[in-house]
Amino acid sequence: MIEVTNLVKRYRDLVAVDGISFKVEKGEVLGFLGPNGAGKTTTMRILTGASPATSGKALVAGFDVFEQPLEVKRRVGYLPEQPPLYDDLDTRSYLQFVARIKGLRGEKQKNEIERVIAACNLESVRRRRLGELSKGFRQRVGLAQALLGDPEVLILDEPTIGLDPNQIVEVRTLIQKLAEKHTVILSTHYLPEVIQLCKRVVIVHRGRIAANDTLENLTAGGRSLEQTFYDLTQQ
Amino acid sequence: MRNVFAIVRKELLQYFTTSVAYWVFAVFSLVTSFFFIRILTFFQRSIMLNSQMRPQMLQYMNFTDQVLAPLFYNAAVILIFVAPFLTMRLIAEERRARTFDLLLTNPVTPFQIALGKYLASLVVLLVMVLLTLVYPLLVSAYAEVGAVAWSTVFTGLLGIFLLGASFTAIGMFVSSLTQSQVVAAFLTFLVLLLLWVVGWAGADNAGLAREILTGLSAIEHIRGFAKGVIDLKDLAYYASLIGLGLFFTHRSIETLRWR
Ligand SMILES: Nc1ncnc2c1ncn2[C@@H]1O[C@H](COP(=O)(O)OP(=O)(O)OP(=O)(O)O)[C@@H](O)[C@H]1O
Ligand SMILES: [Mg+2]
């Protein structure tokens, strides 16, 4: 479903992503881990078409991100690191706008908006201006936006950051439910989340792949995921 | 096209929820009404003066040429100050707030983004320009029959609209160059100011230099419209500013995508 080959991203003299390759199968939730500045966000931005790669190849949902970006964008829901909210709009008109540019019309649009409002528990802030929302609610509106239109691929950059404990549980359950029919790349710094949601994990370090394995193998021999992460990202 | 309308709707919503639109309407109306009253008072005084001293001059005096034409000219100058506020937010703020990524990662093309944003600013501009209709309407309500030449009113408003459309096209492009609304407004203002003062420079020169400099001046091209004449040269001038503005905005969004 997602296939990344030798992806490189250079910012002037800084190499943010340095030849990353990995695959995600359909219906899989991939845990995308790495220390701060490892290149997770950069990789995800490339996969969603928010920024181009310096070199390399990326296939998402069967389409080349650089050759057929529109086809890819139709099939990907993206929650950026910073939720892309228009502070002057209220939750509903914001979701309406995103639904429109995703090509949802009429009844379908209404139903989809109601669905994501329910899924992300946004009922209470439906008429609130986004600029007035608390951090956790902003994060949830950002997630709701990514779910609109039920895209087959979801790329979520730290989706549970800033949520309260109840919401973390809810969002994790939501992602678990999505996992059945969707392909998800999930970046996070909460390792319990990875253990709960992901069967396979990619750990990046300084723009390179430090591990690409099943959770089982990474925690083999009674080692904790924390320990493995620490060992792989130390030097 | 649906994507374009989605963007137009969203931009209009923002124009009105941030009250930028209302402020622009208010300031524009306030300043034009100030000029209107000044020009009208001056017109009245010269009518009275002429009817006492030189009654034969009265037949040369008419409301359209002596009040409306200068009013339109003044409105054009006011646009230099108002247009930057209309366009500063368009792209700069999306980049600062990172909402630009939302547009880039959804199935919308850079051209649709540019066009949608531009059309939204034109809607606000159109309402603003139509507000100046109040003055000829007021006058025709109180004056004798035939005081207002409506064809001139129409061309005058068209001229102001085209001038404003050129200014917003320039402003939108400038807004794509920075993440700061303040910088965008200021730079746009400088460019528009330049487009105005080249006309003065033209007046100081003679011959070919004069032709070229006045030809470049955005405000000079409004004179024909204000007198009721639609000249192909003026139309071409505004059309090319609008086309260039859109073209460069499109390019600029393309390169933003390639960062
Ligand atoms: N626009 C940019 N210009 C220059 N350098 C950048 C830019 N964006 C990211 N970088 C650099 O690229 C590297 C990777 O950043 P990235 O945001 O991908 O890290 P990350 O793995 O998402 O980290 P975090 O866990 O903190 O979110 C960092 O060194 C960062 O400073
Ligand atoms: Mg990140």
Image (cartoon, rainbow, N blue to C red):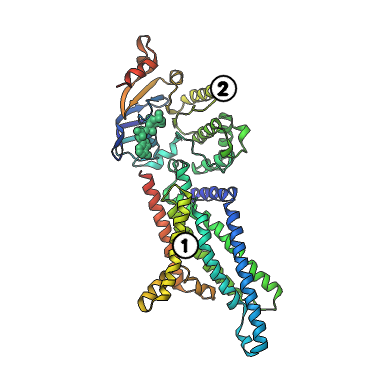
* Image coords of residue A83 (percent x, y): 49, 36
Q: Name the residue under label 2.
A: A166
Name the residue furthest top.
A221
Residue type at the position of mark 1: Ser
Location of residue B55 with respect to B257 vertically, above or below: below
Where does the image place residue B205, in percent across and percent down from the top left? 39, 76
Check the image and report above or below for A219 versus B92: above
Q: Which mark is residue A1?
A: none
Looking at the rendered structure, the secondary structure element under dot 2 is helix
Return the chain for callout 2: A
Regarding residue B189, the answer to whether it shows in the image is yes
On the image, the x and y values in percent for residue A11 come to 32, 39
Picture residue at 36% right of the left edge, 79% below the top: B207
Do tag 2 and tag 1 residues touch (Cβ < 8 Å)?
no
Decide if residue B91 is on the left or right side of residue A35. right
Circle 1 SS class: helix
